[in-house]
Image (cartoon, rainbow, N blue to C red):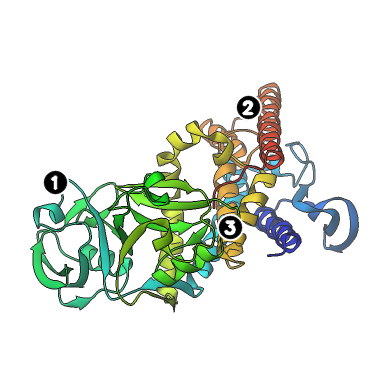
Amino acid sequence: MNIAIVIILFIVMLSVVISLHELGHLVIAKRLGVRIEEFGMGLPPRLLGIKRGETLYSINAIPIGAFVKSVGEDDPTVLGSLASKGPLSRLAVYAAGPVANIFLAFILLSAFFMLPASVIVANGVMVHSVMDGSPSEEAGIEPGDIILEVNGNLVGSWGDVQSMVNSSREGEEITLLLQRDGSQESTSLEPRFDPSLGRQAIGIILCWNVVSQVDEGSPAYEAGIVPGDSILGINGHPVYNPESMSNALASVEEGEEIQLLLLRGQENILVTIPNVSGVEQAALLGLRSHWVDGINIEQERLSVWKATCLGGGFIIHMPEMIIDSIPVIKGDPGKALVGPVGAGQLTIEAVKSFGYSNMLFMAGIISLGIGLFNFFPIPPLDGGGMLVAIIEGARRGKRLSPGAMHLAYTIGTALLIALMVLITFNDILRLIEGGSFGL
């Protein structure tokens, strides 16, 4: 991965997202009769400009940002200024920018979900753990069982189980064909609706392997690995079959520690093992694992309909996800709240871990974030202008006093500047200290 290329792509991506935001303001403002003096891509000084009608369209030297300049700006006495328009017109102009960002996010996320994706498939899926009191526990399903079929349909991936379970009607039983200790048996259970997941569930966590034996006194034993753990990754390399595990171990350099990402119960844990010289197979670590048969990676492409549904669903559920993440934000605001520097670092990590295709996903997330952030009712954000328009509309068009407006915009601007300085300082400090987002 060439970091310089990713940085350039990130700057282009950020410029496009911000420019589309301002373009939304421009289009609606012109349609409502607001006189626009200049629409600029980038920030001054100006490199070149072309005038069309009353508007100058410019390209500027600083490649991040964009702006729309109307005549009179906030002076309601100037004919054709935004401030001279009625509350509904101003509300529409202010809302157009964030709405444009949300629409762009929908397009980008849908396009991302249409891209071919690597999917792990096998001859069934393995049960890592069973939740207490769940339908699966009541049906006698045990960790290490391999689900081969659901209602007579072959299972090849985790998604197969989820979609088949979720498609069952309330109160309807489903039949699972299990493989246990080399023999097959069927069991029936009734899925229950899980409010936290928003879908039908049977109360299991799936995996591709489970540690079946740990030799006493071995490196794995000393590191605290126990039977029942599932190995998810080694030194950042995903582990999904015996070959991928051997390759990950073989890539460990001389003297480098071995970090294993494990699934234990319902938690991911990281354990460290001192380097075992010449490690090429798990046996040298002192552990044995049981795997699902026939595991391999296949390329899967979603239909346009499914991809757009995923893109739309992501946007619809974003406010809910933000609310659910408030405890995480409180616990580590340095990773939850990022500015351009942090977003750039996060993009680099995403591309490094998942490839250049994730630029589309990151662009969608950034566009969505900018759109939602601008809806906050704080001047000088768009949400602040919308709030003023709503208040004045409720007052039958009676304007707020210039003094109150000036005070609100002064306080709001000071708060936003302080917030951006704090976030940017934290982003730069994270880079200096070598911190990451853990992707």
Q: Are marks 1 and 3 in contact (CB under 8 Å)?
A: no
For disc 2, the marked residue is: 400
Query: Going 69% across and 23% down the picture, which residue do you hit?
Result: 407
Q: Is residue 205 left or right of residue 58?
A: left
Q: Give amino acid for label 3.
A: Ala
The type of residue carrying mark 2 is Leu
Tell me the SS state at disc 1. loop
Amino acid type for the residue under numbered disc 1: Gly
For marks 1 and 3, the one nearer the N-term is: 1
Closest to the observer: 278 or 59?
278
Q: Residue at x 49, y 36 (%)?
A: 329
The residue positioned 40% from the left and 66% from the top of the image is 240
In three-dimensional space, the C-alpha distance between marks 1 and 3, rounded to whole angstroms, equals 38 Å
Q: Label 3: how many residues lie within 10 Å, few (<14), some (14-19) or many (20+)?
A: many
Q: From the top left corner, tell me how far across and down residue 425 is, in percent.
A: 70, 34
Examine the rendered structure and indicate whether residue 325 appears above or below residue 351: above
Q: Position of residue 288 (x, y in %)?
A: 33, 61
Is label 2 in a helix, a strand or a loop?
loop
Q: How far apart are the two marked residues, 2 and 3, measured between alpha carbons?
A: 46 Å
N-terminal of the two: label 2 or label 1? 1
420 lies above or below 436:
above
* For residue 360, side relative to residue 287 (left or right): right
Q: Is residue 189 above or below residue 430?
A: below
Quadrant position of residue 405: top right
Q: Residues within 10 Å of mark 1 (few under 14, many from 20)?
A: few
Q: Any mark on residue 133, and which?
A: 1
